[in-house]
Amino acid sequence: MGKFNLPPVDRVRGITKEEFVKNYLKKKKPVLIEGLTDDWNDKWRFEYIKEIAGHQVVPLYNNEPTKGNKSSYEPVTHMKMGEYLDKLQKNEPTDLRIFFYMVKDNLPQLEKDFEYPDIGMNYFKRIPALFFGGSKAHTFMHYDIDLGDNLHIHFEGHKRVLLFGPEQNTNLYKVPMSICNIESIDMNNPDFDKYPALKNAQGFEANMQHGDALYIPGEWWHYISYVNGGFSMSLRALPQDPRRFLGMMYNIFFMRHLDNFIRKIRGQKWIDYKENWAYRKAHRKLGIK
């Protein structure tokens, strides 16, 4: 087992809209912006979420890879939001997390409690989404299916984010017809003997705390682990250039449905086939036997 030794992502404070567009948005380069949400983030605490949504029954997911023909969007359990947030506040060790909880559909009250930062991103205001996680929770390594730019704002607790550009697909063992890598890879403790291409992966590491805003460019891989209980909001901008827009359409309306269709028929055999394909492809390109 090993550990990625990645340089820290750029951290800035007081950046202007012009500076962000020139140095990061146009270059598709990630950056962590401190102080961007200082005018409104004080209210974004566990207690406030419990006050307005503690009664809601929410779907919960864990760290286990999806097996067989089970959908990756199928939760492992349900719980009242208030009960779940109590666990996070007490820092009870748990890998349970809430995934892509739509603000407009589930917590429309929150729309009056934040501002879209004026930094040059053309936000798609239909899909602000919340993500919650306990101290053992992490996401799988992936890039977003819509290929859109993402401003990821964190509240409460701390979280660690690993970031890799799209040119690292081979080094990360990208699975064909998918937006993730081989799910058995432990990104916190990578096995460089079993997955030697990982040693070549170049990226950045971001450590986030309350109010930090992380710009994740479209097509960039990200792996998120919660150091302790916390939650985040994702503000998204749909891809503007034709290549990425067509890529989004392909991913959402063709690739995803075809992959799910084959998975329903072949189950775990399809998952294993794709992961073996990714393993062989990476080693062949890198000349690794």
Image (tube, rainbow, N blue to C red):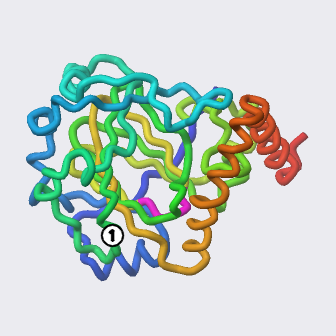
Q: How many marks?
A: 1
Residue plotted at (73% across, 52% down): 170
Question: Is residue 200 among the parts visible in the rendering?
Answer: no
Residue 34 image point, x, y percent: 24, 57
Q: Residue at x 54, y 25 (%)?
A: 64
- What SS does tag 1 mark? loop
Residue name at image x 28 percent, y 17 percent:
92
Q: Is residue 88 above or below residue 250?
A: above
For the C terminus, the quadrant is top right
Where is residue 14? Give x, y as percent: 21, 68
Residue at left 50%, top 49%?
222
In this rendered view, identify the residue nearer to me: 224 or 78.
78
* Left or right placement of residue 143 versus residue 185 in this view: left
Magenta-highlighted stretch: main secondary structure?
Answer: loop
In magenta stretch: residue 193: no
Location of mark 1 (residue): 123
Q: Is residue 231 above or below residue 61?
A: below
From where the camera sits, is residue 33 visible?
yes
Image quadrant occupied by the N terminus: top right
Q: Is residue 263 above or below residue 124?
A: above
Horizontal placement of 30 versus 234: left or right? right
Name the spot of residue 225 as percent of width and height, x first: 42, 36
Residue type, label 1: Tyr
- Magenta stretch? 216-220
Which of the pair 82/192 is nearer the observer? 82
Q: Residue 54 appears at what percent x and percent y? A: 16, 30
210 relative position to 7: left or right: left
The image quarter in which residue 216 lies: bottom left
Neighbour class for label 1 at 10 Å: few (<14), some, many (≥20)? some
